[in-house]
Image: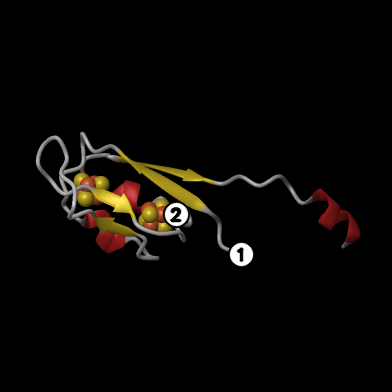
Amino acid sequence: MAAKGWVEIDETLCKGCELCVVYCPVDVLILDKDRLTPQGYHPAALAKDGCTGCNICAVVCPEAAITVYREVKPRARAAAKTS
Ligand code: SF4
Ligand code: SF4
């Protein structure tokens, strides 16, 4: 099963360049055309489920506006014992 992740985008930093949207391998990011940042750009936003927490968007963002979080699951000790 794919890892579950999510992102937070600092809209005070985002300049709407769309790089994160283009590079996201699972296409869960959009530019939100209905909103403007304080600087007047359409901000990037997480549009749907499916983020894997791969961190690519954070790496390509030239403004360092994205923080990626990834779900940490407890180790499957019970499963390991039975195998
Ligand atoms: S962490 Fe990866 S999957 Fe999630 S939004 Fe960023 S590029 Fe897409
Ligand atoms: S790459 Fe960074 S600056 Fe560009 S749209 Fe995405 S969050 Fe905004």
What residue does disc 2 label?
A: 54
Q: Residue furthest right?
A: 82
Q: Is residue 10 left or right of residue 1?
A: left
Quadrant that contains the N terminus = bottom right
Which residue does the image show at 46% across and 52% down from the upper left? 53
Other-residue count near label 2 (Cα within 10 Å), few / some / many at <14 / 14–19 / ≥20: some
Which mark identifies residue 35?
none
Q: Badge 1: few (under 14), some or many (20 or more) residues near its Cα, within 10 Å?
A: few
Q: Amino acid at mark 1?
A: Met
> Mark 2 CB in 8 Å range of ligand 1?
yes
Q: Position of residue 65 (x, y in %)?
A: 27, 39
Spot occupied by residue 25 in the image (x, y as percentages of width and height): 37, 65
Residue 18 in view of the camera? yes
**Residue 53 horizontal side relative to residue 63, left or right:** right
SS label for mark 1: loop
Residue 12 % position (x, y): 21, 34
Q: Which mark is residue 1?
A: 1
Which callout, 1 or 2, points to the residue nearer the camera?
1
Residue 42 left/right relative to 83: left
In this figure, which colouring scheme has been used for the structure? secondary structure
If you read the primary sequence from the N terminus, does the residue marked by circle 1 or circle 2 appear first?
A: 1
List the single residue furthest toward the left: 40
Q: Label 2 sits on what residue type?
A: Cys
7 sits to left or right of 22: right
Residue drawn at x 16%, y 52% is: 17
Image label count? 2
Marks 1 and 2 in Cβ contact (< 8 Å): no
SS category of the residue bearing label 2: loop
Q: Position of residue 82 (x, y in %)?
A: 90, 59
